[in-house]
Amino acid sequence: MRGQPIPIRPRRNVLSFPTPTSGREELTQQLATRLVGQTHAIAEIVPYVQMYRAGLAPEGRPAGVFLLLGPTGTGKTRTVEALADTLHGNEKSLLRIDCGEFQMEHEIAKLIGAPPGYLGHRETPPMLTQQKLGAVTSEGSHLALILFDEIEKAAPSMTRLLLGVLDKAVLRLGDNTSVNFERTLIFLTSNLGASAMRKEVLPDFGFGAAVPGSGEGTLRKLSSIGLAAVKRKFSPEFVNRIDAVITYQPLDAEALDVILDQQIAALERHIAHRLEERAFTLELDASARRFLLARGTSREYGARELKRVILRKLTQPLAAMVESGSIPPEAVVQVVHPGNAEQLNLSVTGN
Ligand SMILES: Nc1ncnc2c1ncn2[C@@H]1O[C@H](COP(=O)(O)OP(=O)(O)OP(=O)(O)O)[C@@H](O)[C@H]1O
Ligand SMILES: [Mg+2]
């Protein structure tokens, strides 16, 4: 064929194709409505989803491996739930392995199943099977999300097993069959460096002043604390197989404000779902929001503290009113915070 002219492909009309970043932007936006204030985490993860969707994820390894570090209640688990919701339409569509359950060498059998003939072979079906991976995918996407929580607690044999999964995307089970992890995104979370990070964001811990504020500087410091702790704990082979180590920063006032809205909306959905025809709606004024945010803002516990405060100061008093029958169906419950009170004031105003 040498010497023959290479046929020139007709030029495609470039304008009729989506711009290369449009899928990325859409996914980024969808995630950002579910995970607040951690844009760098979204920016790290989205390109791997896009690579997978485009069919260009490397062969013979998982589609992406991420280690999520950082203070408690800042959205690490939420990230995986948000992705599950976006990809599969259900935030529970993920496989979560609590590594705290695998601190002893023998417990590994729960994960991969005991070999045939061994005690407990029938009673211990493996937690990680191809079927279980398939069960957390959907019509919309075949990408399975796996979350290994608190990875630093796992016994060394589990870390070795994981090394194989991260490296070759294959896990050999007790019965000698194997599970393929090429169509998975693997998230490892860890508290490594968390106490040093806490000192960094709470230098005056114990003296009460904990007004959140965050920024590039804080994030950089936390990242280097986290990475140093990871390198101390795990072998270079392990660290090398992680695509991105992502450090979560403490949530700032702006993020908590948005999360408060999300939590109130979630509470209203819960009321509508559980109480059906007896459901009612909520109206919080600015004073009630200020009160919940002031009480629920904690650098130590992140958004978990806000959730706790909503539960104690709003959900529980509402439950008492529901039980006593003082909220008629379709009522609007006005929520205000009077003066210096420690409680919110709830009053029924009809609709
Ligand atoms: N960035 C965030 N955006 C939206 N909601 C958040 C965010 N961070 C935390 N939350 C809320 O707080 C709850 C707890 O957060 P999450 O479970 O993600 O914490 P975590 O970072 O995994 O903490 P831990 O290290 O203790 O596991 C979530 O279920 C969610 O409702
Ligand atoms: Mg978590």
Image (cartoon, helix red, strand yellow):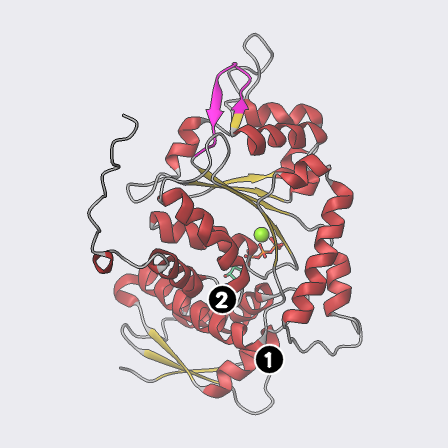
Which residue is nearer to you in this view: 77 or 27?
A: 27
Residue at 52%, 14% in the rendered image: 176
Magenta segment, which residues? Answer: 171-182
Residue 157 at what x, y percent from top left?
A: 68, 27
Q: Do the residues labelled 1 and 2 touch (CB within 8 Å)?
A: no
Mark sitting earlier along the chain (1/2)? 2
> Which residue lies under the disc numbered 2?
36
Residue at 47%, 87% in the rendered image: 286
Give the amino acid at mark 1.
Ala
- Is 181 part of what is drawn in magenta? yes
Give the amino acid at mark 2.
Val
The C terminus lies in which quarter of the figure?
Answer: bottom left
Residue 206 appears in which quarter of the rendering? bottom right
> Which residue lies under the disc numbered 1?
294
Q: Residue 163 carries which label?
A: none
- Is 249 part of what is drawn in magenta? no
Residue furthest to the front: 3
Confirm whether residue 49 shows in the render: yes
